[in-house]
């Protein structure tokens, strides 16, 4: 099993028992991803969490990661599906397992990958779900009755800023969740996003986006403590970034505060923003 040991959400260490022969290989795999394969921070976190979940399940089943079979992985996939895990998430986890076991084969730790011939559940393709225009207008504007004049309203301002950023920029959901203050260049009016191949991708920010970030930063500073010193734009009270689940909860909570009962997700906000921006460019 893996445990977070620093404020960096992508830094983990093995804490499982000595009898788990796979633990050192998990640490080696994460180090390889970070230092040699040089994946993005959000991708590294996804790989790490997926292998951590598999490691935890293997320990509960009294199995070793190095001895799991294709049948074992298929059984775990079935259990995850029965628990309500989304099909897209299962496919991402399967991709993580394939990468992990391919690494083990290359290192000579296992003879063959148990995930190589494993197939995930069938994906149903749908067009992107967009937020209706009437709901979007309520979401991107501060909710009626919210007082943003004092530091005590930090969470409300943060939640609004998250919703606005998901819609108004081309940033991915994990890019928003892990966004750092140092990535925002107010002088050049851009946000810089690390890439795997190219060092940075710069995305332009309009005046309203810059105003949202400026107001949020001032509010965080007035709160002080971990919030005032956090390097993340959208931290929790402890100063650490939001998890994927917490980010989804933020969007749902903000939608509820705006009087919207329909389900709204971070992905829907992002897809709506991309569609609106493309439509404006065609005009």
Image: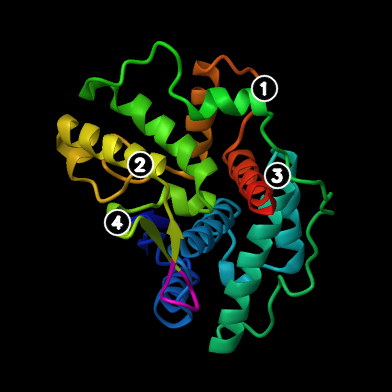
Task: Tell me the quarter of the picture where residue 30 sits.
Answer: bottom left
| Residue 235 visible within the image | no
Across and down, in percent, residue 68 comes to 65, 67
Across and down, in percent, residue 17 comes to 41, 61
Q: Secondary structure at mark 2?
A: loop
Query: Magenta residues?
Result: 195-201
User: Which label is found at residue 234?
Assistant: 2
Mark 2 in CB contact with mark 1 (< 8 angstroms): no
Q: CA distance from mark 3 to mark 4?
A: 29 Å
| Residue in the image at 66% along x and 85% along y | 111
Q: Which residue is mark 4?
A: 5
Q: Secondary structure at mark 3?
A: loop
Q: Secondary structure at mark 4?
A: loop
| Residue in the image at 76% along x and 49% along y | 78
Across and down, in percent, residue 27 comes to 41, 71
Mark 3 in CB contact with mark 1 (< 8 angstroms): no
Mark 4 in CB contact with mark 2 (< 8 angstroms): no
**N-terminal of the two: label 1 or label 4?**
4
Pick out the residue farthest to the top. 145
Q: CA distance from mark 2 to mark 1?
A: 24 Å
**N-terminal of the two: label 2 or label 1?**
2
**N-terminal of the two: label 3 or label 1?**
3
Task: Tell me the quarter of the picture where residue 104 sits.
Answer: bottom right
**N-terminal of the two: label 3 or label 4?**
4
């Amino acid at each position: 099993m893996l445990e977070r040991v620093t404020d960096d959400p992508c830094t983990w260490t093995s804490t499982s028992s000595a009898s788990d022969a796979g633990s050192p290989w998990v640490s080696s795999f994460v180090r390889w991803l970070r230092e040699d394969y040089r994946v993005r921070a959000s991708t590294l976190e996804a790989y790490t969490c997926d292998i951590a979940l598999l490691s935890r399940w293997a320990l509960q089943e009294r199995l070793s990661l190095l001895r799991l079979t294709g049948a074992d992985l298929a059984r775990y996939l079935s259990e995850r599906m029965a628990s309500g895990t989304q099909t897209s998430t299962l496919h991402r986890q399967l991709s993580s397992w394939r990468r992990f076991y391919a690494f083990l084969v290359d290192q000579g730790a296992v003879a063959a990958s148990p995930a190589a011939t494993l197939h995930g559940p069938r994906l149903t393709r749908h067009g992107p779900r967009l937020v209706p225009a009437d709901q979007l207008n309520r979401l991107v504007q501060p909710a009626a009755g919210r007082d943003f004049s004092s530091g005590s309203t930090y969470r409300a301002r943060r939640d609004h800023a998250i919703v606005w950023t998901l819609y108004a920029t081309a940033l991915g959901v994990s890019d928003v969740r892990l966004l750092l203050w140092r990535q925002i260049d107010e002088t050049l009016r851009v946000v810089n996003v690390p890439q795997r191949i190219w060092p940075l991708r710069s995305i332009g920010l309009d005046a309203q986006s810059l105003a949202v970030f400026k107001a949020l930063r001032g509010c965080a500073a007035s709160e002080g403590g971990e919030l005032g010193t956090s390097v993340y734009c959208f931290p929790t009270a402890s100063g650490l970034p939001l998890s994927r689940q917490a980010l989804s909860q933020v969007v749902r909570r903000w939608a509820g505060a705006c009087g919207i009962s329909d389900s709204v997700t971070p992905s829907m906000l992002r897809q709506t923003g991309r569609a609106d921006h493309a439509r404006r460019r065609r005009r």
